[in-house]
Amino acid sequence: MAEHSPGTDTPVSVNVPDKPALEGLEDALSRRWREEGTYKFNPDTDRSQVYSIDTPPPTASGSLHVGHMFSYTQTDVLARYQRMRGKNVFYPMGWDDNGLPTERRVQNYYGVRCDPAVGYDPDYQPPAKPAKNQRDFDVVSRRNFIELCEQLAVEDEKVFENLFSTLGLSVDWDLTYRTIDDVSRAVSQRAFLANLAAGDAYMAEAPTLWDVTFRTAVAQAELEDREMPGAYYRYPFRTAGGEQVHIETTRPELLPACVALVAHPDDERYQKLFGTKVTSPLFGVEVEVKAHPLAKPDKGAGIAMVCTFGDLTDVTWWRELQLPTRAIVGRDGRIVPDTPEWITSEEGKAHFAELAGKTVFSAKEKVVELLAGAGELDGEPKTMMHSVNFFEKGDKPLEVVTSRQWYIRNGGRDADRRERLIERGRDIDFHPAFMRSRYENWIEGLNGDWLVSRQRFFGVPIPVWYPLDGAGNPDHDNPILPADDMLPVDPAADAAPGYSEDQRGVPGGFTGDTDVLDTWATSSLTPQIVGRWSRDEEFFGKVFPFDLRPQGHDIIRTWLFSTVVRGDALQSCAPWKHAAISGWILDPDRKKMSKSKGNVVVPTDVLEQFGADAVRYWAASARLGADTAYEVAQMKIGRRLAIKLLNASKFVLNLGATQDSVITKDAAAVINPLDTSLLGQLSDVVDQASAAFENYDYARALQITETFFWSFTDDYVELVKDRAYGAAGAEEQASVLATLATTLDTLLRLFAPFLPFATEEVWSWWRAGSVHQSAWPASTALAPIAAGADKDLLGTVGQALGGIRKAKSEAKVKQRTEVLTAVISGSAAQVAQLQAGIGDLKAAGNARELKIVEADGELTVYGVELAPAETPA
């Protein structure tokens, strides 16, 4: 029935426990698999033998939830299938402990905050009892803070590893990596320097989305739109002739930063004003009236106040209309303290002085107050709800500030590169296929390159220094770069090549870039990190391009796209052949589970309650891309299936099935039509499940296998017990035992990717080695049987047996009560099938006489006459 892996045909005695149980299997088998290297990748290989997986590195500083079990199980099912298909599976596990989530967790866990100006304390110990208020946190050096980040990340990773082991992930635990260790930092810096050398990375001073709480730049992919209450405020600008031109804005606090008014070129109301100047209220600054097609005639007054910068549309107008820059919001989210040079009137200066140092919220209140006091506010504010940009991890609306940042080209400003990246996506098979449109839509909606610098502490340092001129000013146009053998480097702590540390910050010396790379700039290199790019090119060629990238659909725009960007730039190809996209886990109200909503289920509790196989069954029942509800009922079904597999296997093996009974080549022993019917069905199940797996539709493979399994246990096993014990002679006994052994052997292999613990337990009762190192079943040996089998016969005979059992239940007698006589009617085809299986049907139903008659309509059992019952059921 199957091609067996070496060692699995070693004779082994059948040793079935008296009381099979799922309890304890996770610990015992996980330990055994690791000790025996069951899932180890063999590096002595060539690319054609390998199936490589670019495993998602979970954020180790985050809390565990059932979503981890859901998506990682789906990947593991695919990995186990490929391993059984004979592939040398490269299945690593990474930990994403780089970036802001770790910083936040460390701050709150230890009660510390970082100040780069503080000196390093080699003996520092965090407070035993952290302060509750952040203002009372310990202030520590950058180096001390990084050490605490690394320390806590290691502890968090142990918790994740224990969860994934309990869940039965078949990863090679010798292939773990971290996104912040020396290897990852070196790879990330090397890739950045390669991008820089190729012109794919560059520095620019430009408008940047800025989170005022975390004091860091934010990329487009990290944006989150949130509905917020707001209001339109209406006030006038004035022409040289005194005519009023009213605008409506939600951000009156940016009035001092106004650089133009913009209306649509076809808007007749304002065409006569294009090219003229108007003066702002309160501050008396002249600005020009411009035309631009992005202006919306039907929004507000139809003419917009352009400020640098109120939102991303302002950035577009600033760039395309070549407007001046007049920034008044600092990186702390407050109005700058000094009066800008473009405000020249005494009245304007006095008004600005009342705003200086205020938060944008307080500044808004003050400007509205000043406008009202000057009689400039036209009517009451119009309240409304509008969409506002937030950093996905932030609590305050983003500002747009001007800053010097590093970028990587991603097609946002380059049509040719954009089209090339879309084509890279078409080189990848997305599962489900419609997810490709999310990838393409994201690329087509890009409005700028990828901002990769971050103003944080814990991350991969940007490997760049700058020479200082005689006045101590950095020369950003001529950065100092490290040699490759210096990587990884930290320019904030390491001296620039050719300089000594005492020249840091000194005129004529150097300064190090203090920023770190966006965490996605390192995570986007997971194929290169784990594949040993730039460290072992021979090994890299054995796994790259990877076969599979599994991930959630919510990070197509970030992780998937950014990895394609790096693969295109560094290897000129797509980084994988397939992308398996998982859905979200929803709560019973169909809302996404998230820590912030308080609807997360702790996975350890679920595993303890139902067991790993049950949880895996629930996860694998959901197709890729499908958002799936958290369902305890589905886990209960999975647990019932796993327990039934144990008990049914025990029963089959106790009937006399052995390893020697399994059909591997010669199927001549199978002579009974009922047996050939089952094996014909089994042959179809193998072919259909294999085809489903090849299409990455593991959920269908599970459904097909499970449906057959219940038919096997509920119908076939019940029908053939007597023959299995030899009641019909040695040949009939051999036929049924071959069928039982072959079916059990095949079912264990079919279920192995889904229920690894139960299948491994049963395998150990009668087979050598591990089921997970055995071959995926093939229908080759059963092809002759399947070709001549009546595959519907078993179903018909099983239906008749069900009718007999129902009659006994309705009569409230035990199932072993003898049937003196009964009539079964059915179609001509069903009559023939019943006659072929009459011997097994009589034995299973304990029937003395069964009359089979042909009749129209559905198969019916009637006229059941039962022997007198000894005792009630």
Image (cartoon, rainbow, N blue to C red):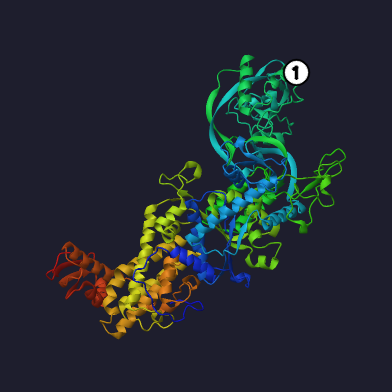
Which residue is at the far bottom? 730
Work out whether 829 lies above or below 96: below
Q: Position of residue 477 (x, y in %)?
A: 81, 44
Task: Please state the horizontal and vertical placement of residue 842, each as a whole percent of the image.
Answer: 22, 75
- Say which residue appears at 69% left-offset and 15% top-offset: 242
Q: Where is residue 488 in the image (x, y as percent from the top left)?
A: 73, 55
Residue 796 appears left or right of 290: left
Q: In which quarter of the image is residue 483?
A: bottom right
- In which quadrant is the N terminus drawn? bottom left
Residue 332 in view, yes or no: yes
Q: Where is residue 298 in the image (x, y as percent from the top left)?
A: 57, 28
Q: Nearer the viewer, residue 525 or 127?
A: 127
Tag 1, which secondary structure?
loop
- Give the residue number, with chain letter if any, for mark 1: 345
Visible residue check, residue 755: no
- Which residue extends farthest left? 868
The residue under the point 24% across, 64% down is: 858
Q: Is residue 716 left or right of residue 177?
A: left
Q: In which quarter of the image is the C terminus?
A: bottom left
Crowding at label 1, few (<14), some or many (≥20) Cα neighbours within 10 Å? few
Asked whether, in this view, residue 69 is left or right of residue 197, the answer is left
3 versus 125 height, above or below:
below
Residue at x 73% of width, y 32% of height: 323
Of residues 38 and 528, which is closer to you in this image?
38
Three-letter amino acid code of the residue under disc 1: Ser
Q: How many labels does the image show?
A: 1
| Horizontal relation, residue 811 to residue 548: left or right | left
